Image (spheres, rainbow, N blue to C red):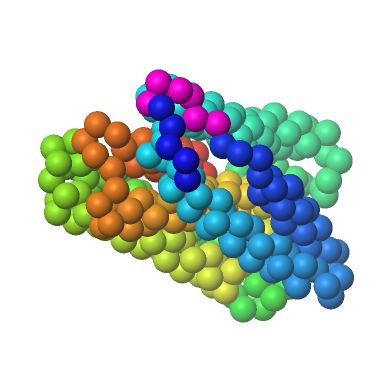
Amino acid sequence: MASHSPDSYYLPSESYYPFVASIALFCIAMGGASYLNGYAFGPKLMTAGLAGMAALLFIWFRKVIMESPAYNMEVDKSFRMGMAWFIFSEVMFFAAFFGALYYLRVLAVPWLADTELLWPGFESVWPSTGPVGAELLAGTIPTATDIAEGTKFALVDPWHLPLYNTLILLTSSVTLTIAHHALRANNRLQLIIWLAITVALGFWFLYFQAVEYVEAYQHLGLTLGTGVYGSTFFMLTGFHGFHVTLGAVILLVVLFRCMKGHFTAERHFAFEAGAWYWHFVDTVWVGLFIFVYVL
């Protein structure tokens, strides 16, 4: 790579990467939609798209890392502005989800109860459980027959796995902050130790999330098809889980770079970008824990 003046704004050469990324994203979307509609080629097309996107991102970010010595502070400022706008878009993304939850709980369900458009005796309660609402709210655990027929479901206990996951994510924010201070103090060993703990906590969260989903499907009768409550529950927690996965992978890559001696106390935007994103998903989870699990 040719050298660049520190006073010049680095501009990368033309690249076909965005075009390839659009093809991969199209395959993912088309494959997923085809799978949901029962087409046999759907899973294969989606898998091909995911594999292509993963390979492309590896190559693309590898190139960016190799180019990073040519970046000056103006480029660094551009990256920070871009990351700030990206996180703002994510805030709006989850604001739409929380807005939909508010609409359902406060407006839609009471309106449907007043109009009696559904079944006789439909009540304005949340979770919207249908004819078995009284039994569910009393803590009745559905039987295997109830689960198979989809007639009853129970709620996830917020003071079990969800509480554990809340403590895990809050702790990971603390360990990540300690790692950041270690980086700014040029303490490479402490940086690696605390960042590794943060990454481990992130994947521990995802493990508990998977266990919770299995328990919900197999023992509680709570699925994506369990009315509007089931769909909103899995939509909100599932999309958040995807963001935690993305954040954990980002921090894992940053960890590998730290182990290779990348970053200095003054120049470490990639670390800060990952930290911003991680603190964001932690904050979103607190909202999910309160408004989805507890209230």
Decide if residue 108 is in sight here: yes
- Name the foreground residue: 62 vs 139: 62
- Name the foreground residue: 159 vs 121: 159
**Which residue corresponds to the image point at 78% horizontal and 63% vertical from the top-left?**
31
Q: Residue 150: which quarter of the image?
A: bottom right
- Relative horizontal placement of residue 117, taking residue 112 as reference (left or right): right
Can you name the residue that lies furthest to the front here? 2
- Relative horizontal placement of residue 236, taking residue 277 as reference (left or right): right
Tell me which secondary structure the magenta stretch mostly adopts. loop
Q: Residue 52: which quarter of the image?
A: bottom right
Q: How many marks?
A: 0
Q: Name above or below for residue 288 compared with residue 253.
A: above
Can you name the residue that lies furthest to the bottom here? 144
Q: Name above or below for residue 124 compared with residue 130.
A: above
**Magenta-colored span:** 6-11
- Name the foreground residue: 71 vs 274: 71
- Measuring from the top left, give residue 196's x and y in whole percent: 26, 58
* Residue 26 on the magenta span: no
**Which residue corresponds to the image point at 19% horizontal and 56% vertical from the top-left?**
193
- Name the foreground residue: 133 vs 16: 16
**Which residue corresponds to the image point at 42% horizontal and 66% vertical from the top-left?**
207
**Which residue corresponds to the image point at 24% horizontal and 39% vertical from the top-left?**
264
Decide if residue 95 is in sight here: no
* Residue 8 on the magenta span: yes
- Measuring from the top left, give residue 294's x and y in whole percent: 44, 44
- Measuring from the top left, give residue 47's x and y in whole percent: 69, 68
Q: Residue 263: which quarter of the image?
A: top left
- Measuring from the top left, give residue 270's x and y in whole percent: 38, 41
